[in-house]
Image (spheres, rainbow, N blue to C red):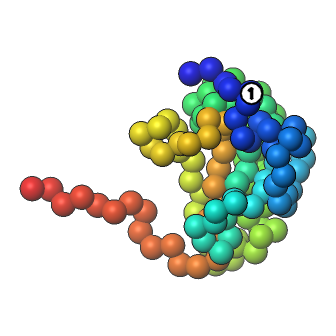
Amino acid sequence: MSYDTDNVFAKILRNELPSKRVYEDEHALAFHDINPATPVHILVIPKGEYVDYDHFLENASAEEIVGFFKAVRHVAREMGVNEDGYRLVTNKGERAGQIVFHFHVHIFGGRPLGGMIKRVKEE
């Protein structure tokens, strides 16, 4: 899959769409999700054109990768969820639930989050 420069996150990076930003540096931009699932629901996106997690790791420089994940950590601390705990989620591909094909990490926190994925009982 090739990168779509008209995806919603690309437009946010170019300031063509508004966002409630909480952090920005040379590697990443973090902003509130417009439809939060938890009291703290922040999206962190790299500034480069990466479709998903694999594409990011295959094509980003080591400096971009480290810078991005340090930004994720910084945002979690700044949002006050580091002490009580938080969950990081990234989806890769439609089957996993990826909707916007610009690599991103969700930071969820602010309440107990429960189990990971509902288990299906084997027959």
Task: Answer above or below: position of 105 versus 11.
Answer: below
Give the side of residue 17 with respect to residue 57, left or right: right
**Total of numbered circles in the picture?**
1
The part of the image, by quadrant, that contains residue 13 is: top right
Image position, residue 113 (x, y; %): 51, 73
Farthest-out residue, top = 2
Image position, residue 61 (x, y; %): 77, 27
Residue name at image x 69 percent, y 60 percent? 34
Residue name at image x 47 percent, y 37 percent? 94
Give the side of residue 83 with respect to residue 92, left or right: right
Front in this rendered view, residue 110 or 82: 110
Task: Answer above or below: position of 17 versus 87.
Answer: above
Residue name at image x 58 percent, y 67 percent? 37
Image position, residue 5 (x, y; %): 74, 27
Give the side of residue 45 with respect to residue 122, left or right: right
Q: Which amino acid type is shown beneath numbered disc 1?
A: Thr
Say if residue 27 shows up in the picture.
Answer: no
The part of the image, by quadrant, that contains residue 58 is: top right
Residue name at image x 48 percent, y 45 percent? 97
Quadrant where the C terminus sits is bottom left
The part of the image, by quadrant, that contains residue 54 is: top right
Q: Counting other residues with Cα less than 10 Å from the Cα at mark 1, is it few (<14), some (14-19), or many (20 or more)?
A: few
Say if residue 79 shows up in the picture.
Answer: yes
Give the side of residue 84 with respect to residue 14, left or right: left
Secondary element at image label 1: loop
Quadrant where the N terminus sits is top right
Residue that carries the numbered disc 1 in the rendered image: 5
